[in-house]
Amino acid sequence: MTDDAGTPHPVTGLDDVVHQRVRLGILTIAHEARRVEFGFLRTQLELTAGNLSQHLGVLETAGLVEVEKGYAGRRGRTWITLTPAGTTALAEEIARLKQLIARIETPQ
Amino acid sequence: MTDDAGTPHPVTGLDDVVHQRVRLGILTIAHEARRVEFGFLRTQLELTAGNLSQHLGVLETAGLVEVEKGYAGRRGRTWITLTPAGTTALAEEIARLKQLIARIETPQ
């Protein structure tokens, strides 16, 4: 243990809004495309529609994604886009995870 | 987006018991020493005693840590030790996080 007990641990810098497993998945997938469709997210993340909606609500409230209703032909579609704040938040999460991994992998 | 919509995303393989921010912190710190003291964890993770106890309970129930009451001189102390299953679970989490990071950092 190299740290003084008074120094907070790297995980204290992680944001639960972003770190939570499902939301990290949403942000990661949204990062990979200009926009993603609700049903695609649901399949990729193996979620119920209700569960996905709940997590999208948390991310939308935090300003990390935009949720947009539209049409593909005559069928209603919901599209999810990462905001610039979402891109930044994902990058910060990844940077902190790398710090954590480096710490775990440093021989004691 | 290179994946078929039918292939589940890497985050579906993350275990919420381990991935949750505070519990990931507990496992990481416990990994760094033979055993850690409750008060040290509480300071490092900036938690209330109640919140830490709750998360330790989840980890103990899952068999990932052992919680042991003892004494340091005349003062009661609670010690936390990573189990072999805890070591394995932390290693799996780290391996999956690396996959996720690699995916995020691969140019689209």
Image (cartoon, coloured by chain):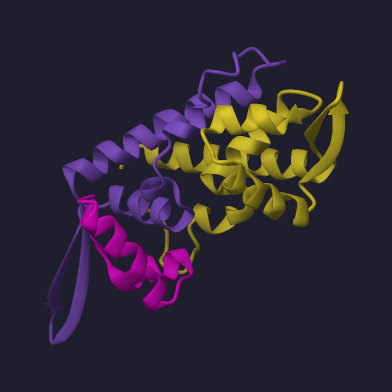
Chain colours: A yellow, B purple
For image coordinates 66% across by 47% down, the residue present is: A53
Is A87 magenta? The answer is: no
Q: In this view, does A55 lie to the left or right of B50?
A: right
Rendering coords of residue A48 (x, y %): 55, 41
**Quarter containing the N terminus of chain A:** bottom left
**Quarter containing the C terminus of chain A:** top left
| Vertical position of residue B74 compared to residue B30: above or below | below
In the rendered image, the residue lying farthest to the bottom is B74
For image coordinates 13% across by 82% down, the residue present is: B73
Q: Can residue B92 be seen in this view?
A: yes
Q: Quadrant of residue B13?
A: top left
For image coordinates 57% across by 47% down, the residue present is: A51
Taken as a whole, is the magenta stretch helix, strand or loop?
A: helix
For image coordinates 24% across by 50% down, the residue present is: B64
| Vertical position of residue A71 compared to residue A64: above or below | above
Task: Work out whether residue B38 or residue A18 is closer to the camera in this orientation and state it.
Answer: A18
Q: Is residue A96 visible?
A: no
Rendering coords of residue B80 (x, y %): 23, 62
| Vertical position of residue A56 compared to residue A77: above or below | below
Rendering coords of residue A80 (x, y %): 77, 36
The part of the chain drawn in magenta is: B36-65
| Vertical position of residue A6 compared to residue B102: above or below | below
Rendering coords of residue A11 (x, y %): 50, 54
Task: Work out whether residue B93 or residue B40 is closer to the camera in this orientation and state it.
Answer: B93
> Total marks drawn?
0
In the rendered image, the residue lying farthest to the front is A74
Q: In this view, does A78 lie to the left or right of B72?
A: right
Is B44 magenta? The answer is: yes
